Amino acid sequence: MAAQLELVQGAPLDLEARPARGDHDVIARMVSDGAKVLDVGCGDGGLIQLLTRECKARARGLERDKAAVRGCVVRGLSVVQGDAESDLAEFPSGGFDFVVFSHTLTHLAQPRDALRQAGRIGERVIVSVRNAAYMRTRYRLALSGRTPAALTWADGELERRCSIRDFAELAREMRFNIETAIPLTNGRPGAPFAKTIWRANLFAEEAVFLLTP
């Protein structure tokens, strides 16, 4: 049975406080007040700041880029340098309410292992993925014969190509329950006609999944 994707209406937000990325907005709505959160591959710490401000979350970050970690620490964020490929195994079981991969999982060499570790250390796992099967991406591929990620061939820019359906099947294969999945287009939740996985796979640019082990 196809998992239903929730269509949510955007709540009024302070424009100055609104995150630059739509998936961050959706993730903040999934996280409960006061929750313990681990943001894997937290980058500049934007999501951590949002969760701390909007959810009063006790959020920490794991980031492998030294410069990004320094920037986060200077701003008072709880971020440590580390590699998800190896360091997630060092976290205690059940240590967090939520483990988040915000556009991170598809950049890992061993995404299954990282997801499995996240399910061990978190009560819930949140994953946002870009949709490689989005209709505009399909159209560009049909016209040019080239994928967007391969156009520059710059080190560190390529990521694993993954559709919404691909990730949903991976989650089920790994025995995660898809509690909810929210499609986004142009950074806004609720893509047109995206009420099921197959429709979202065509009409949504990305999706945010809330998983329970």
Image (cartoon, rainbow, N blue to C red):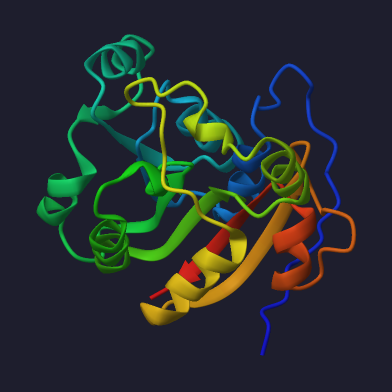
- Seen in the picture, residue 18 relative to 177 is either above or below; the reply is above
Q: Is residue 1 left or right of residue 7?
A: left
Name the foreground residue: 91 vs 115: 115
Residue found at x 42% / y 49%? 100
Q: Is residue 63 left or right of residue 52?
A: left
Residue found at x 77% / y 45%? 139
Give the residue at the far right of this rendering.
192
Residue found at x 39% / y 41%? 58
Give the total of numbered labels.
Answer: 0
- Seen in the picture, residue 15 relative to 4 is either above or below; the reply is above
- Seen in the picture, residue 172 relative to 101 is either above or below; the reply is below
Name the quadrant containing residue 45: top left
Q: Position of residue 195 (x, y in %)?
A: 81, 70
Residue found at x 82% / y 63%? 194
- Seen in the picture, residue 159 relative to 110 is either above or below; the reply is above
Name the foreground residue: 13 vs 117: 117
Name the quadrant containing residue 81: top left
Q: Position of residue 46 (x, y in %)?
A: 50, 25
The quarter in which the N terminus is drawn is: bottom right
Q: Position of residue 33 (x, y in %)?
A: 55, 51
Q: Position of residue 183 (x, y in %)?
A: 72, 55
The quarter in which the C terminus is drawn is: bottom left
Name the foreground residue: 47 vs 152: 152
Q: Is residue 186 left or right of residue 111?
A: right
